[in-house]
Every structure is written in structure tokens, then in C-alpha cells.
Image: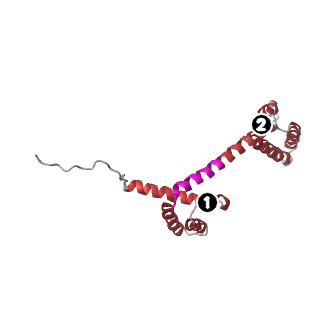
Amino acid sequence: MQDKPEHDTDYDDEIVSKTAIKKECLALQDLGEALTELKDDLLARIPLEETLYDAIIETRNIRKNGAKKRHMQFIGKLMRAADHEAIQAAYQEIEDEQQGDARRLHIVEGWRDRLLDSNDTSALSDFYNEFPFADRQQIRQVCKNAQTEKLNNKPPTNARKLFKLLRETLRQAT
């Protein structure tokens, strides 16, 4: 009987295709490009190595497309060496905050438009039901003034004031 060599069937090393590696590199390069578009205060919240941070800041000064493309590839290379999972998590947190802010602004705009609509008489009571702690007198007065401004074709000073009041009320609710 011949002895067959036993093959080790435990594959500890995961085989990764070249395409998967390229996709990951492009994803990191895209993340780096997104980081270059962040404002300085938001960029400071992301855990970046000094060389990567400097490269991101330097990208803002590059105007030529070819040079910018090369520099983005360089940032992608630096991202591969960095802790890209922590960077991705921090960036995602910032994105979620910004989307939440935009969502809140849309809600405030909706309430403002509804309150300024002279045909919707239940809007004020609906708003007070949803936000019982709101300053009723001030909101009612600003609403009335804003509607008067709208009828007289005056600048929307009180509509802006109403927006700020509603935004602050919504901020207190959360």
C-alpha cells in the first residue's frame, strides 16, 4: 500500500483575489477623497496619522487634475497603512450627524411653512400638542406677524425669527 501524503486542509490564510484588493484600495481612496472635503474642525475629530493629515490638507492646494489624481492615490496608499476601520467609523459618525441635522432642518421648515399657511388653522394646536413646552405666546405672536408680512409683501423677517424659534424648540425636544 502506498502512503499518500496528508494534505493540510486547514487553510488559515484566506485567499484574496486581486480584484478584491483593488476594490478595497479604491474604497480607501474614495474615503480619503471624502476626508479632503471635510472642514478642519470635523477633520480634527478623525484619528489620522500626521502624514495622512498633512497629505489631506495639502490636497486642498492642488489645482491640476493629474496632480490631484496622483495625490489621491498617495492618500489611498497612506490609508492602507493607517487604521482605516477607525477612520471609517469616525467619518461615518460625522456623516450621520450631518444627515440628522439636515433632517431636523427639514422638519423645522415643514412646521414653519405649515404655521405660515393661513388656510391651516389646526397647525398651531398640532404644534403645541407635539411640543407642549414651547413658548406659546411668542410663537403665536411671531406667526401672526409673519403672516401679516407675507400679505403685505414685506421681507420675511418674522418668518426667519419663527424658523429660529422652531429650531430652538426642536433642539430642546431632543
Q: Which residue is mark 2?
A: 114
Residue 103, picture quadrant: top right
Q: Residue at left 75%, top 40%?
A: 173
- Look at the numbered discs 2 and 1 and tell me whether their residues touch, using CB distance below 8 Å: no
Q: Which residue is mark 1?
A: 37
Magenta span: predominant SS is helix
Q: Residues within 10 Å of mark 1 (few under 14, many from 20)?
A: some
Is the residue 132 above or below the residue 95 in the image? above
Is the residue 141 above or below the residue 78 in the image? above
Where is residue 159 drawn, in percent x and y?
82, 45
Q: Residue at left 63%, top 52%?
A: 94
Quarter of the rendering occupied by the C terminus: top right
- In the image, taking residue 29 as reference, residue 141 lies left or right, namely right
Residue 43, picture quadrant: bottom right
Where is residue 69 drawn, in percent x and y?
51, 65
Alpha carbon separation for disc pair 2 and 1: 35 Å
Q: Is residue 21 magenta?
A: no
Q: Residues within 10 Å of mark 2 (few under 14, many from 20)?
A: some
Magenta residue span: 82-99
Which residue type carries mark 2?
Arg
Q: Is residue 83 magenta?
A: yes
Q: Residue at left 78%, top 35%?
A: 131
Closer-to-camera residue (173/7)? 7
Where is residue 128 drawn, in percent x and y?
81, 33
- In the image, taking residue 71 as reference, residue 15 lies left or right, namely left
Of mark 2 and mark 1, the one earlier in the sequence is: 1
Where is residue 58 drawn, in percent x and y?
59, 69
Number of marks: 2
* Mark 1 element type: loop
Which residue type carries mark 1?
Glu
